[in-house]
Amino acid sequence: MLEYEQGVLPCDPTQQRMYNMLPMGTTMTSSMVIGLLFSSRLPVLNSFNKLPVTVRKSARAIVFLAGCWNVFWYGVQHPTEFWGVAALVSGSLMLVTSFYIYGESRLPSVLRRLRPVVQVALLACVLLYGVTIYHL
């Protein structure tokens, strides 16, 4: 309680919950950025595709695990909240993006053709998370 009295932490429980979400939101945003960098076909970012296979597989694992956490943990626990729906959407996009990084041939042709749409949607999620974190 002393921290609240000194004004270090917000007294409002809603604000406190947002501050508690800050580290995980930053982790998810970073994972989405890694996914975008490694799955991009832009010539400027093509150097990420030239990295050793172990680095690309590690990036894929990070993005895949972050997507699983977003979908199967946070999103499932909070399906009626805004951030629960955002977690379901961004998590699903990260799961698909993880296959774009390494193993795209295993995806159905529909998902391969939707690659630009998935990447733009994931970029929108990065912006949503990033702007929200910035404003906290």
Image (spheres, helix red, strand yellow):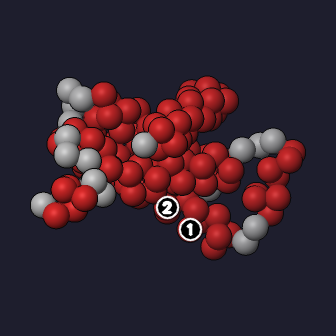
Mark 2 secondary-structure assignment: helix
Q: How far separated are the C-alphas under marks 2 and 1?
A: 6 Å
- The part of the image, by quadrant, that contains residue 40 is top right
Q: Position of residue 10 (x, y in %)?
A: 26, 47
- Residue at the farthest left position: 1
Against 60, is 114 above or below? Answer: above
Could you say which disc has been placed on residue 23 in the image? none
| Amino acid beneath label 2 | Ile
Q: Residues within 10 Å of mark 1 (few under 14, many from 20)?
A: few
Q: Amino acid at mark 1?
A: Ser
Q: Is residue 77 left or right of residue 107?
A: left
| Residue 26 x/y as whole percent | 46, 53
Asked whether disc 2 touches disc 1, contact meaning CB atoms under 8 Å apart, the reply is: yes
Write the residue at 39% across / 57% down. 23
Label disc, if present, on residue 62 of the rendered structure: 2
Q: Tell me the element at label 1.
A: helix
Coordinates of residue 132 in the picture (x, y in percent): 46, 37
Which residue: 30% across, 57% down?
A: 8
Q: In the drawing, does residue 80 fall left or right of residue 26?
A: left
- Relative to 133, does residue 89 appear above or below in the rendering? above
Left or right, 38 with respect to 126, comes to: right
* Residue 40 visible in this rendered orientation of the protein: yes
Does residue 129 appear in the picture of this structure?
no
Mark 2 Cα shell of 10 Å, populated few (<14), some (14-19), many (≥20): many
Quadrant where the image shows the N terminus: bottom left
In the rendered view, tell whether residue 15 sits above or below residue 55: above
- Report the residue marked by disc 1: 58
Residue 79: where, in percent of width, then height?
22, 31
Identify the image quadrant of the C terminus.
top left
**Which residue: 82% across, 58% down?**
47
| Among the 4 quarters of the image, the one containing residue 42 | top right
